[in-house]
Image (spheres, grey):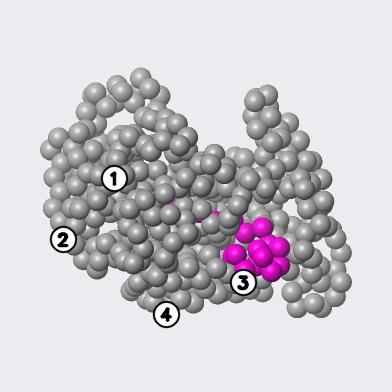
Amino acid sequence: MATPSLVASVVLQTSRALGSASAGLRLAAAAWNAARQVHTSASSSTPQLGGYMRTGTGTEVEAHPETPRFFVTGACGQIGQEFLPFLRSKVGVDNVVASDVRTSRKLLDSGPFSYCDVLDKDNMARIILENGITHVVHFATLLSAIGERNPALALKVNTHGIQNVLDLAAAHGLSVYAPSTIAVFGSSTPRHNTPDDTVMRPHTMYGITKVHQELLGQYYHDRYGVDYRSLRYPGIISANAPPGGGTTDYGVEIFGAALQTGHYNCFLDSDAALPMMYMPDCLEATWQIITAPRDHLKQTTYNVTAVSFTPAELAEAIRHRLPHFSISYSPDFRDSIAKTWPASIDDSAARQQWGWAPKFDLQALADDMLTRLAAKYKVQLPPELVAQQQGSGSSRSVVAAGEKPAGTPVAAAV
Ligand SMILES: NC(=O)c1ccc[n+]([C@@H]2O[C@H](COP(=O)([O-])OP(=O)(O)OC[C@H]3O[C@@H](n4cnc5c(N)ncnc54)[C@H](O)[C@@H]3O)[C@@H](O)[C@H]2O)c1
Ligand SMILES: C[C@@H](O)[C@H](N)C(=O)O
């Protein structure tokens, strides 16, 4: 069966090749709409057009909109802030409704925004119906460290949030993308090259709620036909938005400290190896899984990674550009969490089934972070890094599909 994702992604790729963005979007919208009607009528998930309270029969007006329309929860977070402009550049500003329980001037000025607490299912239903939403991107979550500070709230937000999203998806025939995490694994999981399908006995409340999310997504897919897709992100490193309270946050903080004070006191120990990814790779992976042809996907959740490194190795990559940078270590409870997570993960299924291939290795990531943050903090960078960045136009290190990036070799990240 031709899925909306398949048809629209083929059309988007074709239009990209033709170099015509607006024509491409129109084509994609038409193809998406045609395929979506086939998909919806053939799906085992019958939209309850009278709403989930079954108060009437409703009309089809909002069920088959002209274009894919996205609703993003937790849009003010580290990933949401960067995914929002990325997604809007692909599908159009007005086809993406951002939401969160907080906001910013930038977010409000950038396109449609609605206040939405993911615990409030009625409000979420209202936004979905009023805006003709077809896809939910669910980012609203409490991360690992903040979750250990308030486990009861993490349990509530993380489990009820995804349940509300999935219930509404089943009721209204929506597709759902909700990321998972390497935190689903625990100390009894194989720690190196961790496969997709393995022991999941996490020790944090965050990890427990994400195992629940993965299983619930699979259940709604199998039972109600919900097109649920998920990636297990590693730690995400980004220059624009600050991280939201996780164990991998050191990987962002270290750059600000290096440029502003020349020293960083790390809350993980020097040898705490973790899988990581730079934000541009995270955005691409997310778009790729959302638009991947349904029949290419053999599972609902995939491991994805780019590079594995320890705090000491990241410090070395920074010192390569800023020789005076120094680091000290004061491991706290986050180090204990990190030690229960994989040092590296196996993402070969993602590579084989839908073509996942990261572009940034450790040094490329470090160089790009330093360049962007130096501009933000108005700090002078070493001339050779400036020259190299200007010369290449970008510090990307393209990694061929199926290869591991050239950072720390996975086997050595022990
Ligand atoms: N950032 C990473 O390194 C990383 C790694 C693995 C997985 N993930 C996953 O990616 C997703 C996004 O993570 P992030 O790093 O952007 O998180 P974040 O903490 O930066 O952002 C989460 C957002 O959710 C919002 N939120 C919290 N409670 C809410 C509620 N009740 N209703 C609505 N919004 C609420 C917060 O205000 C915040 O803006 C999460 O599912 C997370 O598990 C992130
Ligand atoms: C790994 C991930 O899920 C998040 N960055 C955290 O540390 O909690």
Circle 3: residue type: Asn
Q: Note whether ligand 2 is within 8 Å of mark 1.
A: no
Q: Nearer the viewer, residue 154 or 341?
A: 341
Magenta span: 217-234
Residue 253 in the figure: left or right of residue 21 = left
Q: Where is residue 163 shown, x and y percent of the image?
A: 59, 72
Q: CA distance from mark 2 to mark 1?
A: 26 Å
Q: Where is residue 31 shown, x and y percent of the image?
A: 78, 41
Tell me if residue 181 can be seen.
yes
Looking at the image, do the residues carrying marks 1 and 3 touch, with CB atoms under 8 Å apart?
Answer: no
Tell which circle, 2 or 4, labels the residue nearer the N-terminal end.
4
Looking at the image, do the residues carrying marks 2 and 1 touch, with CB atoms under 8 Å apart?
Answer: no
Find disc 2 in the rendering and name its residue.
Answer: 330
Q: CA distance from mark 4 to mark 1?
A: 37 Å
Q: Nearer the viewer, residue 323 or 43?
A: 43
Find disc 4 in the rendering and name its residue.
Answer: 152
